[in-house]
Image (cartoon, rainbow, N blue to C red):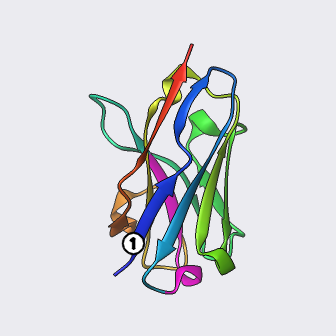
Amino acid sequence: QVQLVESGGGLVQAGGSLRLSCAASGRTFSRYGMGWFRQAPGKEREFVAAISWSGDTTFYTNSVKGRFTISRDNPKNTVYLQMNSLKSEDTAVYLCAASTTYSAGPSQGLYPYWGQGTQVTVSS
């Protein structure tokens, strides 16, 4: 089993920044890919970003490319999502997810483990 706890969400004005953190426990964090997803009210959960076990490979959905950066600190068992130039359409609950493979990607099926999420609200 693995436990994931997100933090860092909040209310920010459009154009502002936030950094989300996801602390993992329960198994060898450094061996597995990690992802961030988000779900806005009335919408389906969507992929945001993912990172391989080593951090060498990253993936982003088109709408956040150039604005968001995913990274990880394996000794700290933590993955981060730096979000800059935030827009009102980024408002959502952001969820961290852990895969069971070295790689990562946009498919939700890769991730059997999920956190509870942290709310990000961007005011225009």
Q: Nearer the viewer, residue 106 or 83?
A: 83
**How many labels sit on residues?**
1
Residue 57 visible within the image: yes
In the image, what residue type sits under mark 1?
A: Gln
Q: Quadrant of residue 99?
A: bottom left
Measured from the top left, where is residue 8 in percent x and y?
A: 56, 47
Q: Quadrant of residue 67?
A: top right
The residue at 39%/72% (across/down) is 3
Q: Quadrant of residue 97?
A: bottom left
Q: Compared with residue 10, is residue 5 higher up or lower down, i.e. above or below?
A: below
Q: Nearer the viewer, residue 103 or 20?
A: 20
Q: Nearer the viewer, residue 104 or 74?
A: 74
Q: Quadrant of the N terminus?
A: bottom left
Tell whether position 34 is magenta.
yes
The residue at 62%/57% (across/down) is 80
The residue at 55%/43% (across/down) is 61
Q: Residue furthest bottom?
A: 28
Q: Residue furthest left?
A: 42
Measured from the top left, where is residue 26 in percent x and y?
A: 42, 83
Measured from the top left, where is residue 121 in percent x and y?
A: 49, 28
Q: Quadrant of the C terminus?
A: top right
Q: Compared with residue 13, is residue 82 higher up or lower down, i.e. above or below?
A: below
Residue 105 visible within the image: no
Q: Crowding near pointer 1: few (<14 within 10 Å), some, many (20+)?
A: some
Check disc 1 and report its element: helix, strand or loop. strand
The residue at 47%/78% (across/down) is 25
- Please state the extent of the stretch shown in magenta in the rendering: 28-37
Residue behind mark 1: 3
Tell whether position 13 is magenta.
no
